[in-house]
Amino acid sequence: MPIITTPVVTPPDTGPPGGTPVPLPEIGQATAQYTDPTGKVWPLTDWDAGWFTLAEGVSGLGAVTYELTTDAQPRGGVRLRHAQPQARTIVWPLFVQGGDHLEMVERWRALATAFTRTLREDEGPGVLEIARPDGTRRQIRVVYVDGFEGQDKQGWGRDADAAVLQLLCEDPYWIDPVPVTVHRETGSLADFQNPYPTVSSSQVLGETTITNPSDTTVWPTWVVTGPASLIEFTVTRTLRTGQTVTEAFTLDPNAAAVGHGNLLSGEQVVIRTQPPQVRFQDGSLEGAQWIGALDWPTASLWGLAPGDNQVSFVLTGSGPDSAVDLKFNPRYETA
């Protein structure tokens, strides 16, 4: 009778716990980890964990796939009208082993639950993170599709098995978990008559250049701190056709839909541009809904294009404590 044995997989030299970078297709040397919807972190390139990434089977970490819309040109060829980024699918093989069958099964079940729970409506996606040797990281939100069936091979399933995961990324771009922040506040406002006539406008903060290091547009979150009676946000950009485009939105705390009146010193409004959301005092869902304070239907909650953006934010009725804070996470084509 033939003896069934577990296939031998030689572990890489991963060094200390947490692992060392391994060669991943499309991106090169990196380490990886997965954070499930509960916040638990699962290392993916640390052999000591009892499971390890089979790097040769990894795919889907490269540039985003686009669907192009073009218009035929009368003299031949086409002109690109729109490029629509498509959802990304990542294939990630995992080799799981144990000191005996029961230990392997325990690890297998725990990992399966960590990925499949991304399909629960009350939990949502997990996060796959790729880290470089220089300490930089990029993350992407993932949803389990399939792959935790195991390999139907002789000997597999006793002390070790492999899962070839397929993970759906609804947003195909990789995110830098370290946000870019911009802070602007008013200077000291001068008395018009003391010691001599001085111009000190109540419309402050003015124009500034905000640099977006991303490969694509980002959608920032704004925090406005009063006092202020009206807040205007404008961006001006030049398209590749040479056309100059201006987008803007205005927040009015005196709008009838809100009925609050001027923002007082220390009061804040949080404006999210994707998806559109405006909250008074608290950026969470508990904050008062102020979406009606925007100047609909003309309001355009614009994003920041890659590179330098010429931005203007003006607070009418500002004072010494008035400020605007901007935050966004850069987005990239590859891991």
Image: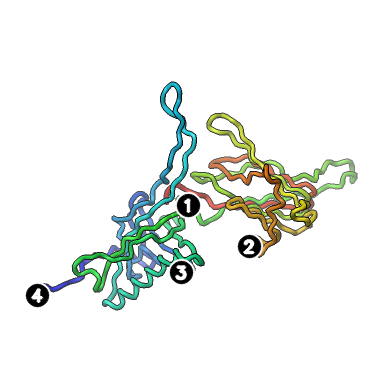
Alpha-carbon span between mark 4 and mark 2: 65 Å
Q: Nearer the viewer, residue 61 or 43?
A: 61
The residue that disc 4 covers is 1
Circle nearer the viewer, 3 or 2: 2
Q: Tell me where residue 152 sits by quadrant.
A: bottom left
Q: Is residue 25 left or right of residue 232?
A: left
Q: Nearer the viewer, residue 253 or 232?
A: 253
User: Label 4 sits on what residue type?
Assistant: Met
The residue that disc 2 covers is 284
Q: Is residue 182 left or right of residue 64?
A: right
Q: Tell me where residue 269 sits by quadrant.
A: bottom right
The residue that disc 1 covers is 171
Alpha-carbon span between mark 3 and mark 1: 22 Å
Circle nearer the viewer, 3 or 4: 4
Alpha-carbon span between mark 3 and mark 4: 44 Å
Mark number for residue 40?
3
Label 1 element class: loop
Q: Nearer the viewer, residue 300 or 264?
A: 300
Question: Which of marks 4 and 3 precedes in the sequence?
Answer: 4
Question: Which of marks 1 and 4 precedes in the sequence?
Answer: 4
